[in-house]
Amino acid sequence: MNPRPALLLDRDGTLIEERHYLADPEGVALIPGAAAAIAEANRAGVPVVLVSNQSGIGRGYFTERDLAAVMRRLEALLAAAGARLDAAYHCPHTPEAGCTCRKPRPGLALRAAAELGLDLRRSFVVGDKEADLGLARAVGAGALLVRTGYGREVEAAGAAADAVFDDLAAAIRWALGRILHRREGAGPSGASGQ
């Protein structure tokens, strides 16, 4: 199987509303338009992969079991809209742990690439934090910033994104256009943002 481009999405502040150290499934609220855009990617055959720092586990604020309950709720909300994640990866460590999986380090993306057959250099990382953009740079992927969550502050601080979008739906649609354009053999096209 040839490696495929994918969409690597942050969770908190990008796919769902930012809730500091979310441990309660009832607190899961999708960003408007996100599920429909993910469903478009699903229909186009582009893998959608969640990559998320969850240091609340390492800090003792919640458990892996709590995280699993939150993820089940997220997956149910997506499924109700006809959307799905192809895989989800998280780093449970604190920033001080020095692990290789905490964004912006590439561990989560490299694991996804190995397990799912992804071409990270033709993929896009979408997020609302500098760590997401750093992950994209670390693996050679496109770095897309969204203005939801912490994104406006990151943009105002001058973050080096390839493109900036109001929300995940706009970022996914833009990235899908580039991925599908390349798939047709037309080659890469430049970033313009929105």
Image (cartoon, rainbow, N blue to C red):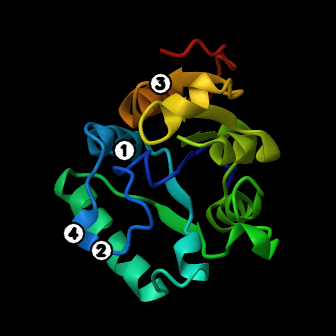
Q: How far apart are the two marked residues, 1 and 4, measured between alpha carbons?
A: 21 Å
Amino acid type at image mark 2: Asp
Q: Which residue is mark 3?
A: 165
- Give the mark toward the camera: 3 or 1: 3
Q: Residues within 10 Å of mark 4 (few under 14, many from 20)?
A: few
Q: How far apart are the two marked residues, 3 and 1, measured between alpha carbons?
A: 15 Å
- Looking at this view, name the residue that lies furthest to the left: 80
Q: In the image shown, does 64 or 62 lie closer to the viewer?
A: 62
Query: What secondary structure is marked by label 4?
Result: helix
Q: Which residue is mark 1?
A: 38
Residue 135 percent coordinates (x, y): 72, 48
Q: How far apart are the two marked residues, 4 and 2, measured between alpha carbons?
A: 5 Å
The vertical placement of 152 against 7, above or below, is above
The answer to whether residue 181 is left or right of residue 71 is right
Q: Give me the residue at 69% from left, 50% from top.
A: 3
Q: Which residue is mark 2?
A: 24
Residue 187 percent coordinates (x, y): 69, 19
Q: Quadrant of residue 133?
A: top right
The answer to whether residue 112 is left or right of residue 126 is right
Amino acid type at image mark 1: Ile
Query: What secondary structure is marked by label 2?
Result: loop
Q: Which residue is mark 4?
A: 26
Query: What secondary structure is marked by label 3?
Result: strand
